[in-house]
Image: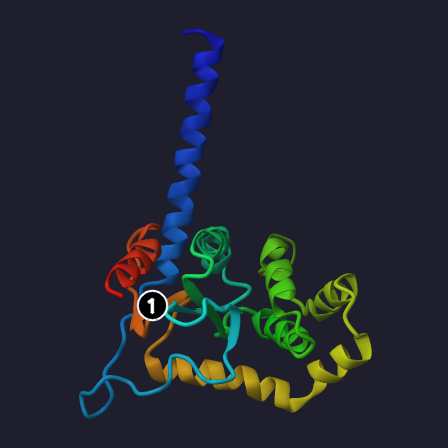
Amino acid sequence: MKPGVKAGIVTAAVVVVLMLIVFVVVIVNQNGKEPPTSDGSAPSAPVQRENSHVLDDGGEGAITVVEFLDFECEACGAFYPIVEDLRAKYDGKITYVVRYFPLPGHLNSRNAALAAEAAAQQGRLDDMYRELFETQAEWGEAQESRADVFRGFAEQLGLDMPAYDKAVADPATTARIDVDFNDGQALGVDSTPTFYVDGEKLQLQQFDDLENAIKAALETQ
């Protein structure tokens, strides 16, 4: 076998293995089912509130995609580039909403959510959202607080640091995160990422499921 052909086969094999690993991580973190309430009815909570954070506003007639996310979640990190591609591809056709769902097992997920919410109060949520996911490998799974790292991100983004520090320390900021988390629990969210398209919860089985749901919603308009 020629060296070039052999190298190509090895490279392709590595790519396939990596994709399988990422897919397993996503499925493991996205395997919860929506539990019924005590009276057998579906859980009741708003998928989106008036003050929910909108990253992309598609305007009138757009479908709405809501993601409950945890910035430290590896599956959320794996989905991040897919989500960014979809946001660009369907720009003007979807309204993209993010809600905080910091899982208790992740030491820095709440610190990251605080950093994101503090940035949101200065109109810079999208910038902090990208920074947190694009650097996740550097701080994720740490066994000590990375609040100082997130503060460094805020400085790099040029945020008003006294206002940032005040927001992070403000109980109202924590309460804002808790609203999202509590809504998620009431809806039956127990893993991340969890997506809703026009109010319908998705049960992802493969990477294409999110885009397929978006396409289906657009076709029914």
Residue 128 percent coordinates (x, y):
64, 65
Residue 142 seen from this side: no
In screen coordinates, is 17 left or right of 169? left
- Mark 1 belongs to which amino acid? Val
Q: Residue at x 60, y 85 (%)?
A: 174
Point out the image quarter for the C terminus: bottom left
**Foreground of the two, 90 or 125:** 90
In the displayed orientation, state which residue is furthest to the left. Answer: 40
Residue 202 percent coordinates (x, y):
30, 65
Residue 30 seen from this side: yes
In the displayed orientation, state which residue is furthest to the top. Answer: 2
In screen coordinates, is 177 left or right of 155? left
**Foreground of the two, 81 or 6:** 81
Q: Residues within 10 Å of mark 1 (few under 14, many from 20)?
A: many
Residue 37 percent coordinates (x, y):
25, 88
In the image, residue 140 sits, relative to residue 15, either above or below, namely: below
- The residue labelled by disc 1 is 197
* Colour approach in the figure: rainbow
**Foreground of the two, 132 or 51:** 51
In screen coordinates, is 24 left or right of 146? left
Point out the image quarter for the N terminus: top left
